[in-house]
Amino acid sequence: MDLFAQLLVNGVIAGSLYALVACSFGLILGTTGTFHFAHGVVFAAGAYGAYFAAGRGLPLWAAVGVGIAGAALVGVLIEVVVYRPLRKISASPLVILIASLGTLIVLENAIAIGFSTDAKVLEGFPRKGVIIGGVGFTTLHVTMVAVSLVVFLGLLAFLHWTRTGRAIRAVATSPEMAEIVGIDTGRVFLLVFAIGSAMAAPAAILIMMDRGGTPDMGMEAILIAAIAVIVGGIGSVPGAALGALIIGVAQNLGVMQIPSEWQAAIAFGVLLVVVILRPHGLLGKKLKKAEI
Amino acid sequence: MDYVVHVLINIALYAILGVSFNLLLGYTGLFAVSHAAFFGIGAYASALLALHAGLGFLWGMALGIVVAGLVGAVIALPALRVSGDYLVIVSFGLQIIVFSVMLNWQDVTRGVAGLPGIPRPTLLGWKVNTPSEYLPLFLAVAALCFLLARRLTRSPFGRVLKAIREDEVATQALGKNITRFKVLVFVVAGALAAVAGNLYAHYITFINPFSFTLEESIFIMAVVIVGGAGNLWGSLLGAVVLVVMPESLRFLQVPPTVSGAIRQLIYGVLLVLFMRFRPQGLWGEHAARPATGPPRPPGGTPAAPPAKPARSPLSEQPLLEVSGLTKTFGGIRALSNLSMVLPQGTITGLIGPNGAGKTTAFNVITGFLPADAGVVHYRGVEITGLAPYRVARLGIARSFQDLRLFQRMTVLDNVLVARPEQSGERLGRALAAGARGRREEAVNRDAALAYLDFVQLLPKADEIAENLSYAEQKLLALARLLATEAELLLLDEPTSGLAPTTVGDMLALIRRLADRGKTVCVIEHNLDVIKGLSERVVFLDGGEAIAAGTPETIMADPRLADLYFGR
C-alpha cells in the first residue's frame, strides 16, 4: 500500500510538471493552430537561461526570472522568424510542422554546442526531505505541484475573466470572426507565444534543480505534452492538464508491473488506447462530419 | 580512398531509406516519422539470425523484410485512424516504442552494449570483406530498390497512392479501398528500409539502438524533404546532399565533441530554410515530368462514353430506391424519413431550400455517412451501410460541391485513376507488370482520353489539375466521374459557380449522358436549369421528400414555391 501511495504521489508530481508544458503547448496549438514542436526547445531554453544566469552570480530568484524571460523571448522569436513568414505564404500545416521540427533540432544542438551535452544541475534551492504517512518527497516536489497549480489556475482565470483572455479565446474559436470584430490576431498570436513560453519555463527550471537537465530535455517534454494534449482533447486547456496527470500517474504506477525504463513506451501506450477508443480526446469536442 | 568509399556507401544507404520513405511521405502523403524503426528492425533481425543461427546475408534480408513488413502492417493500423498532426505523434510513439524494445530487451538485443561481431556477408561463394568490395553490393541493392519503387510509383497502384495523398474522400468515391493501399505501402516501405538495415548491419558489423533513434527518423525525413517529396530521383539527390554536406566539416577541423551537434544543426537549418523558400525540395514532383507534346487524340476510339444498351423498359424496378432514411447530427435532423426513387435512364432533379438535406442524402446513399434508420436499395439489392468504395464499385458515382480533384496530379491521371478494375492496382501485378498490364493500361488510357475529349479537355491532358480554370475543373470532375463507368451518377451542383454560357455546355453534356442510358440525379438550385434538364423533380424540405413530379407541377404548387423562396 505504501508503495502504491508513493508511486501515486510520484505520478502526480511528474504529471504536474507535464501539465505545465502540455497546457502551454495546448494553448498555442488551440489558439494559433501551430503544431509547435519547437516548444520543446523553448522549454529547455528556460532551464539553460536560468543556469546561465546563476552561473554569472545572480541570486536564484533572479536567475529563475531570467530563465522565464529568456524562454518567452525565444518563443516569440520563433513565432516571428519562422512561423509568421510561413503563414504569410499560406504554407500547409505540415510545412509549418516540419519547419518547427527543424527549429527544434537547430536550437537543441545550439544549446549542446554552447553548454555541452553533460547534465547540468541548478543548485541553491533549499531542499528538505519530508515523510508523511510513509510517503516521502522533498520541498522541491511540493514547490513543483504548487507552482503548477498556481500557473494552471492563473491561466484559466486569465482566459475567462480578462478582456485579453477573452480575445484569445475568440481567436481560438474562429480567427476570421475575431478579425471581423476588430481583434488583431497577429498580436494575439504573439501574446500567446509569450505566455505559453513563459509558462513552460518553470517546469524546465524545476527539473534542472531536481535531477538536472540536458540539451535534449525538450524533446521528451514536448512528446509527452503532445500526447497529453491529444489524450485530453485538442483545444481544451483543462483537458491538457488532465492528460498530463494521467500520463504521469500511469508511468509511475506502471513501475509496479513494468520496469521503469519502459516509461516512454507507457506514455505512447496511453496515447494509442485513447486514439483508438476516443480519437477526439477525453475532454475534446467531437468532430462533426456533417459536411463531407 | 577508403574514406571516399565509406561516403559513397552512406549515400547508397540513405538513398534506399529515402526512396522507401518517399513512398510513404511523398507519394501517399502519410507523415509517419518512424522510418528508423523499420531500418533498425531489419538490422536487428539479420544480425540476430547471423549471430545465433549462422544464417547468411540473404536469409537475414528475407527475415528482416518479413518482420519489418509485419511491423509495418501493425503500425499502419493506428496510423490509419488518424491523419496529419496526429499521425506524426503516433508515429513518433511507435518509433520510441521500437527503440525502447531494442534498448530494454536485454536478453535478445543486449541493450546499450549492442550486438558486435556480425559476420561479413558471403554471396555465391564470394566473401565481401573490404569497404571497396562492399560498395558494388550496396550500389546494386540500392539500384534494385530504386527500380522496384519506381515501378511501383508508375503503376496504377502508385497512381492510387497519389490520389490518396491528394484527397482520401474522393479516392474512396472512385471505388478504391484506401485502407488496403495504406497498409500495403507501409509494408513495402518498411520492407525496403529493412533491406537497408540488413546491409548496414553486415557492413558496420556492430549495431546498437542508438543508430535507430527518432533523430535518425527525422534525418531520413530531411533526405526526402530536401531532395523533393513525390519524386524518387529527388531522394537520391537528397541522400547525396545530406551525406556529403556534413562531411565537409572534416576539412574545417571542427573538434569531434561538437561535430555531431553541428551536423544536426546543419540539417535542421536546411529543413527550416527549405520549408520557407523551396517547400517542394531541390528536385520536386513536377520538375520530373517529361516534356511531352500534346497528347495524340485517341485513335479510333469513340469521342463519347460508349453507349450502354438501355435496360429493357419492361423492368419496372427503379435503379435506386431510398426508403425511410433518417440521419441526425447532434440534435439536428438532417434527414427525416426520406423516401424517393430514381428510375432507370432518367434525370432527376433534387431541389429544396438550403439545409434541406440534399447533400446529406448523397452522403448517406454513397456510404460516407451511416444512416440512423432506413434502407437504400440499388437494383433491388440492399446497400445500406456498405463502405463508400463498395458502393462506388457497384456502379454509383458521385461528384462533390467542392470538386475534390487530385490537385497535384495531371488532368489525364485524374481520369485514369478512376478507371474501374485495374489489375495493376494489385501490389503483385504492379511490381511484376508485363505485356498484359501494359495493354490494359493502354486501353484505360484511351478510354480516359476519350472522356477528356467528351468534356473537351483533351488539349489539357498533361496539365496539372490545379492549373485549370474553375470551369475546366468542373468538367474534369465530370470526366473523372464518367471514367468510373458507373450506371448511376449523383451530381452535387454541377453548374454552381459557372458562367451562364458554360452552364449551357455542362447541361448539354449531362443530357447526352442520359441519352446514353445513364441514370442521373442532380442537386440544383437554379429552377430554370432544372426545368431544362430533368423530367422529374424531388422536392426536399427538412430532410423529407415532400413532393415529387414534373418540374412544371412542382413549380406550379404555391406551397412549395413559398417554401423554396422562404416566404
Image: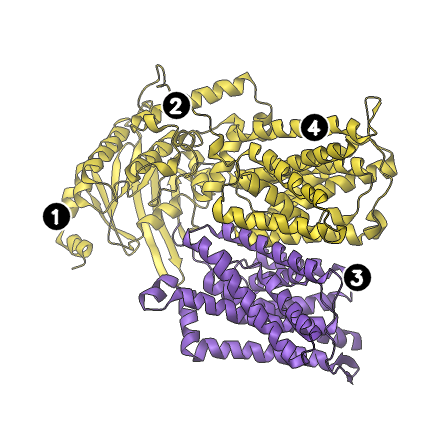
Chain colours: A purple, B yellow
Q: Choose top left, top right, bottom left or bottom right for residue B467.
A: top left
N-term mark: 4 or 2:
4
Establish if B417 lies above or below A78. Answer: above
Q: Secondary structure at mark 4?
A: helix
- Alpha-carbon span between mark 4 and mark 2: 40 Å
From the image, state whether disc 3 or disc 1 is nearer to you. Answer: 3
- Alpha-carbon span between mark 3 and mark 4: 42 Å
| Residue that label 4 marks | B139
Q: Work out whether disc 4 and disc 1 sit on a shared chain.
A: yes
| Residue that label 2 marks | B447
| Residue that label 1 marks | B556
Residues at discs 1 and 2 in contact (Cβ within 8 Å): no
- Viewed as shown, does residue A271 lie left or right of B334? right
* B505, A83: nearer the viewer: A83
Q: Work out whether disc 4 and disc 2 sit on a shared chain.
A: yes
- Viewed as shown, does residue B106 lie left or right of B161? right
- Alpha-carbon span between mark 3 and mark 2: 61 Å
Question: Percent position (x, y) of residue B185?
Answer: 59, 38
Question: Percent position (x, y) of residue B345?
Answer: 28, 31
Residue located 52% across and 26% down the image: B423
What residue type is disc 2 on?
Ala
* A268, B29: nearer the viewer: B29
State which chain disc 3 sits on: A
Q: Work out whether disc 3 and disc 4 sit on a shared chain.
A: no
Question: Percent position (x, y) of residue B128?
Answer: 82, 27
- Alpha-carbon span between mark 1 and mark 2: 43 Å
